[in-house]
Amino acid sequence: MSDKITGAEALIRGLIAENVDRVFGYPGGYIIPVFDRLYDYTDRLTNVLTRHEQGAIHAAQGYARVAHRPGVVIVTSGPAATNLITGLSDAMMDSTPLVVITGQAPSHMLGTDAFQETDVMGITQPVTKWSCQIRRADDVAPALARAFHIATTGRPGPVVLDLTKDAQTGLTSDKPYTPCNFIRSYIPVPEINPEEIRRAAEMINRSRRPMILAGQGVTISEAEDVLTRLAEKADIPVAATLLGLSVMPSDHPLFKGMLGMHGNIGPNVNTNRADLLIAVGLRFDDRMTGTVECYAPGAEIIHIDIDRSEFNKNVRTTATVHADALMALEALLPLVRKTDHKEWNETFDRHNRAEQRLICNEATSGADPSEPAKMGEVALKVSQVAGPGAILVTDVGQNQMLSARYFRYTAPRSIVTSGGLGTMGFGLPAAIGAKMGAPERPVCLFTGDGGIQMTIQELGTIMQYGTAVKIIILNNNFLGNVRQWQELFFDSRFSATPMVNPDFRMLATSYGIQAENVESRSQLDAAISRMFETPGPYLLNVNIREADMVFPMTPPGHSIDYIMINPNDVYNNNL
């Protein structure tokens, strides 16, 4: 037996040693050696052939988010690598662990403008946690080990390994793969400072109107249970960012809803009435805070995060805890006193009940059955039929905001959406990856007629692999979210937002996916039932009124408690 293997072989063996059983990839000239070696390992390592490289990376993101494992992408050089940039940026902003492997021209041709040569390092370094070009077969396995360590530890994120063709075909020693668990200059998990924990506990114990703001960092560190125990012990209301949804079940009495521009009225109003905000694993982005100068004027703020760079970046804090969310909350729990904040909690519920009366996104007993369904109504009914453990995947736009608000979450890791970058086209491939990452759980994709057409070719991936995604298109023949802003803020000048759409039902059917149109509310319940009674993938094209909008809404340039409840009225928060 030879004591030498190719770099491509070392890569495949390394992936298997890292317990990777699935990669999302698209072959091409400068990555053929890797795909050639993969041919002999298909019993242990499956390649999911997407229809576009952007589809591959979004599918890997969906997989990573629900499986709690890094997503792996393998593509060739040049246009294949550049097609990944949107997904890399998305993963970087949303802290999604990815290991992305790109092919590259041979080392001796670098810098010559060779066919499909691109400066992958220069392009990807600003949107990745780490990028590395590999030119020798001896460096393949060590670089792969570092890539997995960096992608999955600390604040997770995407890494890129750019393999020249000679690194893939060159020979290296046939020796066991060694995982990486230490890099001298990289400290992913900071040591907890007891003084920071003590100070935070004191602030919580003296607070009369505390509020927990839960971000995706809670999910990443698997801190959902201890967060719930802390909230229950101190009777603290909890609200979540878009990506933090599902950290607590939707029906938990202390869970008060979503924060931000289209969040629930109760948590948004009370953000500016609280005397203490406990922010865990979030970055205080502008869609959450509204105008920062008006944000939480009467509150002290505790910020718990594993990434020190987030402290005081957008919002000034009173105390910081630089730590993993799970470790920080476990340290806080015994120091926090058992408390009763009944009256404070009831104010959230009063505002949220008022929201239900004022904003009609759900069907009522008087709803006209011949009218198109409301977007929130569709999301709620799909969630109810999908049952416990269902995963919501969204595209970006009105479909995203209303499905996230009205879906009911019963388990952690139940929402996959593009938060920071807001990537239209994310939904369909991400849903494929999510279903592959959690095949035992129902996966419901909500998308718009605009977003789905950005990556609609991935219906071919569903056809090839039979991925049982339930697809719901909220179809208003418009780029709905932009249309809403045009109506509210640009004098109803609907520039470049009306859509002329294909027959989505016929298109899905051509890919072997069962589908039907839902023209009115009267058809909705039966269509949803058929969708979930049918094994395999299914598509519902649901007719939505083009003029429907997402409310409540805090418009840009306003305080988070300035809340529009329709195009003409602002919520009176003096309850």
Image (cartoon, grey):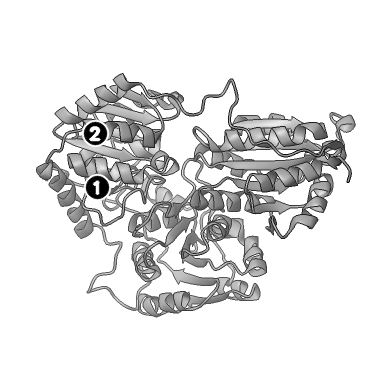
On the question of residue 316 being in view, the answer is no
**Image position of 402 with respect to 378: above or below:** above
Q: Which mark is residue 334?
A: 2
Mark 2 or 1, closer to the camera: 2
Disc 2 residue type?
Pro
| Residue at image point 30% right, 62% down | 361
Residue 58 located left or right of residue 478: right
SS at mark 1?
helix
Q: Which mark is residue 407?
A: none
First in sequence, mark 2 or 1: give its number: 1
Q: Quadrant of residue 399?
A: bottom left
Q: Nearer the viewer, residue 77 or 176?
A: 176
How many residues crowd around disc 2 within 10 Å: few (fewer than 14), some, or many (20 or more)? few
Which quarter of the rendered picture does the C terminus lie within? top left
The residue singled out by tag 1 in the image is 265
Residue 217 located left or right of residue 77: left
Q: CA distance from mark 2 to mark 1?
A: 32 Å
| Residue at image point 13% right, 48% down | 346
Disc 1 residue type?
Ile
Q: Quadrant of residue 203?
A: top left
**Image position of 124 with respect to 549: above or below:** above
Residue 287 located left or right of residue 468: left
SS at mark 2?
helix
| Residue 374 x %, y % | 35, 66
Q: Nearer the viewer, residue 121 or 82?
A: 121
| Residue 525 x %, y % | 37, 77
- Look at the numbered discs 2 and 1 and tell me whether their residues touch, using CB distance below 8 Å: no
Q: Nearer the viewer, residue 566 or 15?
A: 15
| Residue 78 x %, y % | 77, 41
On the question of residue 328 being in view, the answer is yes
